[in-house]
Structure formats: C-alpha cells, structure tokens
Amino acid sequence: MSKIICLLFKLLYALKMYMDFTEAAKGSGFMLTNMECESWDKEFVYFSLCQVEKRSQILSVLNARATLRKTASDIKANVKLLRKLNRIYQPFLYDDFIDVCGLLANMDDKRQIFWSSITPVITKHTNVNHSCPYYPQDIVAHNFSHDAGYASLLPIPKGKYRVQVIFWVNGVKRCKINIYSEKF
C-alpha cells in the first residue's frame, strides 16, 4: 500500500515539476483540483483520507491516509496521464507499468529514469521511505503541494488532466488513485 502512495506521490511530483516549469517559463498556472481513492479490497488497504484542499487562488495541497492492513512484499503500479478532450479523459503521454519495490530499492535505475527522478520528492512528503516489504501501517501524505525550485520534466499544454494509478499488491489488483489537475 505504501508503494501505492509512493507511486501516487511520484506522479504528483511529475505534475509539480510541470507546474514549476510552466509558471516560470510561461507565466501560467497549475492547480490540483480533486483526488479520488478507491480500494477494491478493504481487508488489505483502506483509505481514511483522500482530498485536495484549496488554500488560495494559486495553491492547493494533497492529503491522503491509507491503512495497509497486511504485508505488501510485491507492489506494481500502472500509471497513466490522461488529458480531458471533448468531455472525456483520453490517454496522454504516459502509460507505464512500474515495479514500485524495485524502484524504491534502486532509485538510480536507468530503466526507470523518469520515475527515479521524482522518487526523492515522494519520500520527502510522505512516510514512504524504504523498499519493500511494507508491514501493516498507515501510509500518509500531508500537505503535498508544488513549490518553487523544481525544473519541469513534463511541459504540457493548457487543459484538464488526470493521473490514474492502479496498484497490484502481492499479485492482486487492490486499489486505484485518481488525481485531477488543471493547467491554465
């Protein structure tokens, strides 16, 4: 489960890098607008908090708490970036299948260079800070937001976006996290 949250925050970091680049280079803004968390196996993982809080016209923060109820020793994630076109979210740019445990064990992995580059931000803003296994515990992200100082690896056009992360833990599809944002 913590790998799920870790991957979620990696995606948030990618969005954060995008926000910083577009704001600095183009004078435009980027805002997290909503977050949805869904567990298909509440005996394994349960979300007690899953929200985006708007702090001002230009700042929103993500807060999440997931309770991992059983040991997670193998975590994989399908991460997709979707863009809203004609009222439908359609695939855009990324659709990766990631070995989260492998990534956390070796953050210098050249095969996952994009995800390796955002892992430190995830570990900074969450309690996901080591490789597998993850034993029963709460996985927490608190006040995760974009801030100055990060270069963009993902410049994208204006529009509405969704990052979708589906987690497979110990070989079973367990949960899904959607993060919505808007570039303006």
Image (tube, rainbow, N blue to C red):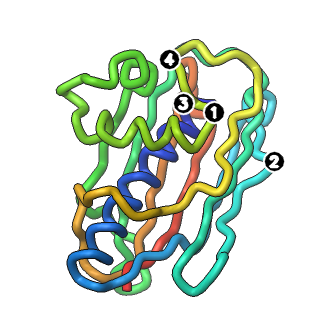
Q: Residue at x 42, y 50 (%)?
A: 11
* Marks 3 and 4, the one that precedes in the sequence: 3
In three-dimensional space, the C-alpha distance between marks 3 and 4, rounded to whole angstroms, equals 9 Å
Q: Is residue 3 left or right of residue 46?
A: left
Relative height, residue 9 to residue 45 (above, below): below
Residue 132 % position (x, y): 53, 15
Q: Which mark is residue 93?
A: none
In three-dimensional space, the C-alpha distance between marks 4 and 1, rounded to whole angstroms, equals 12 Å
Name the image quarter holding residue 139.
Answer: top right
Considering the numbered disc 1 on the image, is that residue within a helix, a strand or a loop? loop
Q: Which residue is mark 3?
A: 3
Residue 165 % position (x, y): 48, 47
In three-dimensional space, the C-alpha distance between marks 4 and 2, rounded to whole angstroms, equals 24 Å
Nearest to the eye among marks 2 and 1: give it. Answer: 1
Name the image quarter holding residue 2.
Answer: top right
In three-dimensional space, the C-alpha distance between marks 1 and 3, rounded to whole angstroms, equals 10 Å
Task: Give the amino acid type for the residue marked by disc 2 in the picture.
Answer: Ser
Considering the numbered disc 2 on the image, is that residue within a helix, a strand or a loop? strand
In three-dimensional space, the C-alpha distance between marks 2 and 1, rounded to whole angstroms, equals 16 Å
Callout 3: 10 Å neighbours few (<14), some, many (20+)? many
Q: Which residue is mark 4?
A: 131
Task: Give the amino acid type for the residue marked by disc 3 in the picture.
Answer: Lys
* Marks 1 and 3, the one that precedes in the sequence: 3
Callout 1: 10 Å neighbours few (<14), some, many (20+)? some
Q: Where does the C terminus fall, quadrant-wise?
A: bottom left
Q: Looking at this rendering, what residue extends furthest in the left direction? A: 110
Nearest to the eye among marks 4 and 2: give it. Answer: 4
